[in-house]
Image (tube, helix red, strand yellow):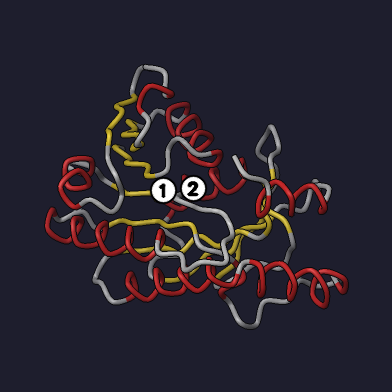
Amino acid sequence: MRITVFGANGPTGRLLTDQALAAGHQVVAVTRRPGTLAPRAGLTVAVADATDPATVATAIEGTDAVLSVLGTRFSKNPITTYSASATVLTDAMTRQGVTRLLVVSSNILDPQWRPSGAYFFNHVLDPLVNRRLGRTLHEDMRRMEGVIRGTDLDWTFVRPSGLFDHPVVTAYRTAETSADGVFTARADLAASMLREVAERRYVRTAMGVITTAVKPNIVKLIWNEGVKKK
């Protein structure tokens, strides 16, 4: 299968690219910084901005599935990364007849999501970090989902919980709409996306993804994912 990965230079994108190549897929890695991706068999590097129609159209030409792991950090200012890229991607896919789209969103977008046995997270961290510090980011994720829902594409919203780094794929869990857990390893997020491309269990709905086998340090997670500047 030929897979186009937007956000291929990010922490999840690199894992997704590695896993897809290891599984025998042809991968088009879309990035604005091509010199940082080493040449490999099966890999094509495409220089594109996900909000630029011309370069996006070129990047997805001839692909079987588009996987977007684009992301940005929390900000007090309005964020448009997710919705702007969704508008361009869906338009280009519709024009070229590419139908399969997976985009990373968040379990937070399910208003009923409250992880079991996580009192401190549900009553302190979630309201403070996700609903306040991450408000503008999650507002734009909602706009992104709205844009994609309005298309005829075979889309899947991939919704992790708090992302963290772990070296290997674990026995992660998935569930429709959202998944009951606080954390998601990036390796598991990538693996779940590749599995969904093949199995198509969550077409035109959301797939929650969680990691339960290992847990990160939550203070470091908040700092690394939402606060620390690159």
The residue lying at 61 percent from left, 40 percent from top is 187
Q: Is residue 189 left or right of residue 35?
A: right
Residue 61 in the figure: left or right of residue 201 = left
Q: Which mark identifies residue 198?
A: 1
Above-or-below relation of 28 to 215 = above
Marks 1 and 2, how far apart at CA: 5 Å
Q: Which amino acid does the dot numbered 2 rest on? A: Arg
Residue 109 lies, with reference to residue 38, above or below; the image says below
Q: Residue 148 sits in which quadrant?
A: bottom left
Question: What secondary structure is found at the residue carrying circle 2?
Answer: helix
**Quarter of the rendering occupied by the N terminus:** top left
Farthest-out residue, left:
95
- The quarter of the rendered structure image containing the C terminus is top right
Q: Which residue ends up furthest to the front in the rendered image?
A: 77
Q: Residues within 10 Å of mark 1 (few under 14, many from 20)?
A: few
Q: Residue at x 66, y 50 (%)?
A: 225
Quarter of the image where one finds residue 74: bottom right
Q: Report the side of 70 relative to 110 (left or right).
A: left
For the point 13% across and 53% down, the residue is: 96
Please say if 112 is above or below 87.
below
Estimate the x, y position of residue 21 in percent, counting from the top left. 43, 28
Percent x, y for residue 88? 24, 59
Residue at x 67%, y 76% (from the top left corner): 113
Q: Nearer the viewer, residue 142 or 94?
A: 142
Query: Which residue is under mark 2?
Result: 195
| Proximity of marks 1 and 2: CB atoms separated by less than 8 Å | yes
Q: Residue furthest bottom?
A: 112
Looking at the rendered structure, the secondary structure element under dot 1 is: helix
- Amino acid at the residue labelled 1: Ala
How many residues crowd mark 2 within 10 Å: few (<14), some (14–19), many (20+)? few
Instruction: Write down the quadrant of residue 58 in the picture.
Output: top left
